[in-house]
Image: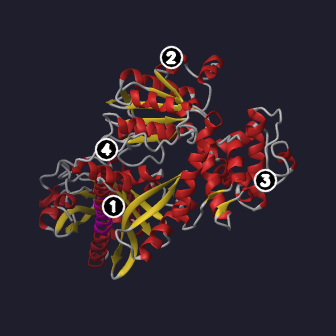
Amino acid sequence: MSERGIHMPLHEIQESVQQIASAMASALRVEVEIADHNLLRIAGTGRTEAGILRTMAGEDHVYRASLFDGRPVVIMNPGADERCRPCTHFGNCEETGEICCPITLDGRNVGVIGLLAFDQEQRQRLFADVDAILPFLQKMAELIASKLKEHLTYVEQQLTLEKLRIVMDDLDKAMLTVDQSDRIVQANQRARHYLGIADPSENDNRRNTEQETQWIQAIRQAVDTGVTPQKVVLHVGSTDKEFLFSIKPIQLAGTTREWVIILDDVHEVVAIARQVGGFQQEDAFSKIVGTSPAITQAIDVARQVATSDSTVLLTGESGTGKELFANAIHQAGYRKKGPFVSINCAAIPEQLLESELFGYEDGAFTGARKGGKRGLFEAADKGTLFLDEIGDMSAHLQVKLLRVLQEKQIARVGGAGRAIRVDVRIIAATHRNLEQLVAEGSFRTDLYYRLHVIPIHLPSLRERREDILTLANGYLQACTARLNKHMKDFTQEAQALLFHHDWPGNVRELANVIEYAVNMETSSWIRPESIPFHAKREPMQQGLFGAAGTILEQPLNLKERERAAIIHALQLVKQDKRRKEEAARLLGISRATLFRKIKEHRLT
């Protein structure tokens, strides 16, 4: 234990000390007083209770002697004993007797316990059996010392944990710790960014999501293959990410308690290697697939403004690749060495979203982490902050965001207005019509124009059908490699089905449909029967498809087709006794969007 820890005062455990004092007073029927090494009264009963947490200056000579000598002191005649002479109450003391004993911790006197009598009855009880009282008093002193040591040990542990957290968050590698049940216990900032998860340490009772459990299982299976370097593909959100990894046990007394997993994003490792080796950096927009005029125009605009610092607003339906575009703009700009931080404004309740964006100070609210927490604006400093679904942001947060855009500084929740400067490029995105929201009064006009500096519309798959089969083939190759299946291609009928489908979930839905088909297909060709929206022939579907799976010309508008797709997805998961969340995966939309659409279309 450190020297600083030894001298920590008893008032750190004042409540426990007071409980011990009260218990002693009740048992002995005398008054009890406990002071720290600076002779500050920490606890008291009866007449001394009013002086708790006040100095005993001028009344502490007997206690001082006990602390100095490290031995008990017995005063039979307070006010007349020579040892009391320096006291201001000498010759006129209210006490009728006193016994005190030092509290010793690791060879140092950290306080003193005093037993006091104020009348003849208390005096008789105090001195009836001094030989028995003194050992009891010493045991109580040892009890207080042990309580203090427990507290100091806890403080040291918390300090060590906080140091470890800071070191972990500063690593340029993603780090996870998992327990024997494969539950993620800790995840540093980079790991949370890579995997899109919240901080596990903020919820001790947190359980893994199904996807998180699959990640740990995939890592353990990759270990079993014995292939080096160790590499694993993790399905994160709606995309596959490839990582180099290592896993090491944490052992105590020869027993493995937890494991540490280190992850390196393969694309980042390759990019760094290219920079170091002098190779030309990969085009940041190369991951955006498509050659149609609609997508090419969007890429050209995004590429042109990437080196700017102006705010970008990406518009388009859900699943059109807004985050992919935002990341590409970041990687192609001068901020590429800084962080890219993203958040879905529609997926987080307003109260949590404010603290996530702006952070909070220590004690800002019940359950706030000790020491406070940085918000995403601070985390994205010198980089890019991607605000997805900005159209769903509350009016209160719209005001705060506008202030940040104007003043380039934020204030943490509970921070008493303390300004923190941030250097962040904002890329916002929405699937909603912001102009209509402005007209309705649900979105601020001034914020709209602050965001609408460089608008880029991302086309839906219906607007670029010529890219559908190219995208589908790319997803087919990725899925077959990851699932270790051998698929040649799509049959002509399947290609026609994919080409003519309206894709309300766009690219995200297409990726999920291909993954579903690869899992379901038993031959080496993807056939229409393996495509989910071909699998059933419910009455709802007859308005979209004929008996042979060809699309019928029906006067359905987009809203009706969206409703039909949601109904069909819900029917599929219900038939297979799966959760509604699976319908969101099939549609290529988020869980929050699915439930919003269910409410919007009045479905159950």
Q: Could you tell me residue 408's position as x and y percent? A: 36, 25
Residue 421 locus on image (x, y percent): 32, 29
Q: Which residue sits at x=55%, y=59%?
A: 479
As for residue 146 lying within the magenta part, the answer is yes
- What amino acid type is highlighted by mark number 1? Val
Task: Answer with mark 1 or mark 3, whichever residue precedes in sequence.
Answer: 1
Q: Is residue 495 visible?
A: yes
Residue type at tag 2? Asp
- Mark 4 — residue? 281
The residue singled out by tag 1 in the image is 32
The CA span between labels 1 and 2 is 67 Å
Of the 4 image quadrants, the one containing the N terminus is: bottom left
Q: Position of residue 129 (x, y in %)?
A: 30, 77
Query: From the viewer's perspective, is 222 left or right of 429?
Result: left
User: Any mark on residue 446, and which?
Assistant: 2
Q: Is residue 44 above or below residue 126?
A: above
Going 57% across and 52% down the picture, which residue do you hit?
473
Where are the magenta residues, as a range? 145-156
Question: Which residue is identified by label 3?
Answer: 571
Q: Residue at x 51, y 26 (%)?
A: 398
Residue type at numbered disc 3: Gln
